[in-house]
Amino acid sequence: MNNTTLKRISQILEISISTVSRALKNHPDISDKTKLRVVELANAMDYEPNANAINLRTSNSRLFGLIVPGISNFFYDSFISSVEEESRKNNYALMVLQSGDDPLMELNNLKLCRQNRVSGLFASISTQTTNYDPFLKLKDMKTPVIFFDKVPDHNGFNKVCVADTASANMAAAALARKDKKKILAIFGDERLLMTRKRLEAFKETTAKRNPSATITYGFAINSQDAEGITSTYLAQKVDAVFCMSDEILTGAMRAIQKQHLRIPDDIGVIAISNGFIPRLFYPEITFVETSGHKLGKLAFSSMMACLAGSTFIQELTIESILVEGGSL
Amino acid sequence: MNNTTLKRISQILEISISTVSRALKNHPDISDKTKLRVVELANAMDYEPNANAINLRTSNSRLFGLIVPGISNFFYDSFISSVEEESRKNNYALMVLQSGDDPLMELNNLKLCRQNRVSGLFASISTQTTNYDPFLKLKDMKTPVIFFDKVPDHNGFNKVCVADTASANMAAAALARKDKKKILAIFGDERLLMTRKRLEAFKETTAKRNPSATITYGFAINSQDAEGITSTYLAQKVDAVFCMSDEILTGAMRAIQKQHLRIPDDIGVIAISNGFIPRLFYPEITFVETSGHKLGKLAFSSMMACLAGSTFIQELTIESILVEGGSL
DNA sequence: AATAATACCGCAAACGTTTGCGAAATTGTT
DNA sequence: AACAATTTCGCAAACGTTTGCGGTATTATT
């Protein structure tokens, strides 16, 4: 372990600890001469301030917690990447925790955050989270909590989300423009607010803009599930398939390729996506972009606003754009 | 912030701080009666031990640092996910840091790790890292450093890697078995030890097992690069393309799909991969699996061995297996 | 030359824990 | 009843910082 402390330096230089501390912080009370002596010795001795001591003394950990169901996910990894980058730029570190979509693990992670006195928390909740008390406990401790992506269906929280309603609308509208009439629309877990929002918007916009269309709804828990659903319904000659997420898109694409259907001639495809998966194929899949990167930046700025004292609860969304591939 | 401390509890109960501390740890010196009183009040007051104070006192942060060029990567995200999971199970937290493949940022991150007195470090180095002193500095502080994936070409470090040589051999052998004669082999950045190992092995095994084959070599910095290279050489009627990594595979696949080539009839494809991307296509791409998940487990166990006192420097590799898709 | 201002530095408390050691109270032993 | 053993607890130091306050030197002002 690193042994050089302020005390050690002070002993060698025969000055007080406080002088050493101030010298290293370039405090005006200290003369240039001693500053120099201190800084030089500190460098020579590889002095590294002990973050734990500083945190204890100042009660500011400069550490953010981030809880997410899983890291391995096209959306979350770019979100995390973005938040980490911003945090680092602002001299914060990031503690990443996975819940595995398990509410119990989520609780454990929250405890860890509390014990580490995180300066703030970014959280995407598990599918089955119903008790928000632990989050409220953090808020009571004046620790900002920014929910993202999978957010509680509940007011009084800071949330940053992709524009669920708007993006589902855009996708439905795109299908309407292309005059797709038999649509297979696959959604995720219905317990998620996100799913319900997208579902409702998609249904509504299709009814309005594409009244003669018939929609077959599918609900998939995972990619494999989506593949199964797609395979099943592909038999009944659908014009196009809408995928609510990347995970679903991957399943749908497997089914489509397996049946040797040509995109877009035999079937149209559109998804709500981060953009990575759609660009893996040719023609590229048309998608409504929901950028994890952008969302991360937004979440971070929201966090900074809270830390700066804003007590204003806001629910922010990033607008999404339609990125045309050749799949419709 | 959470205000309840041992001191507060001790004042209310009119006992000493040390008694409270010991009671909460179920220390035998404390009577059951007082233990009960303490535990109950602690719960009622939502007591959470202050990790910073504990770390300071015990000089054990129970925090691992993890430095990686970027999180958004098929390999790293599963690696990180795995390490995080293991860490959490063992009561460690994980601080994730990205270098952006920039040696300077890497230095900053290392400093952060030192200042936070991490209990250990997992590191995948940047392409241009040449100075290993900061890593050695950590080792001198008795902080274990486990390099993974992109490791220094240098002895005396703990490293865990995918079996570069073996997996390139396997891929070359698979191509030989299928009697592919005109091979396009695309590799990554030559400055990486990993690349050089894979290149050499691929070349050697092909020469031995498939002597009549001709290999065209390509070196791609990124996916787009790989797409360009593939497009260019596809014209000259190659039998199969070998991709050293997922990133390269995505580029190659774009080029192949764009030219409407049928896999495996028109062209064979094989890659070294985590397995996610290959399964997105149909037929699935045949690949030599290098599991980030497995590597994460290995890295973690290596870390635990070091923490347990093992001073033995080891270079571990996970064996890879060939996963047959239908692309060859 | 006396006084006022300024530059420079140290004392000591505090942040919230852990832990070795000793002390008091209780119980057991003869 | 005297002593020993055991149970139960508190004292105080330590971990490495930060910071308000006060105290000497030194310099400036008249």
Image: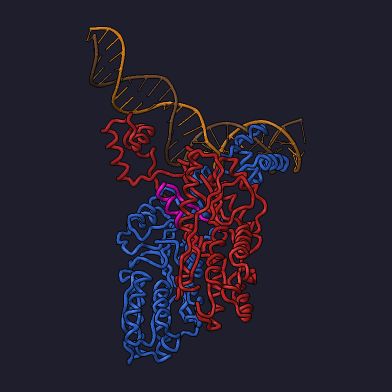
Chain colours: A red, B blue, C orange, D brown
- Residue at 39% in and 74% down: B251
Q: In this view, does B255 lie above or below C5?
A: below
Front residue of this view, candidates A324 and B294: A324
Q: Percent position (x, y) of residue B17?
A: 60, 36
Front residue of this view, candidates A140 and B300: A140
Q: Percent position (x, y) of residue A298?
A: 48, 51
Q: Percent position (x, y) of residue A24?
A: 34, 38
Q: Percent position (x, y) of residue A326?
A: 46, 73
Question: From this viewpoint, is residue B168 visible?
Answer: no
Per the rendered image, the range of residues in magenta is: A81-98
Q: In this view, does B53 lie above or below B319?
A: above
B137 left or right of B1 in image = left
- Residue at 32% in and 74% down: B219
Q: Is residue A97 magenta?
A: yes
Front residue of this view, candidates B40 and A247: A247
Q: In which quarter of the image is residue A51?
A: top left
**Total numbered circles:** 0
Q: In which quarter of the image is residue A12?
A: top left
Question: From this viewpoint, is residue A118 visible?
Answer: yes
Q: Is residue A249 above or below residue A135?
A: below
Q: Does the magenta stretch include residue A43?
A: no
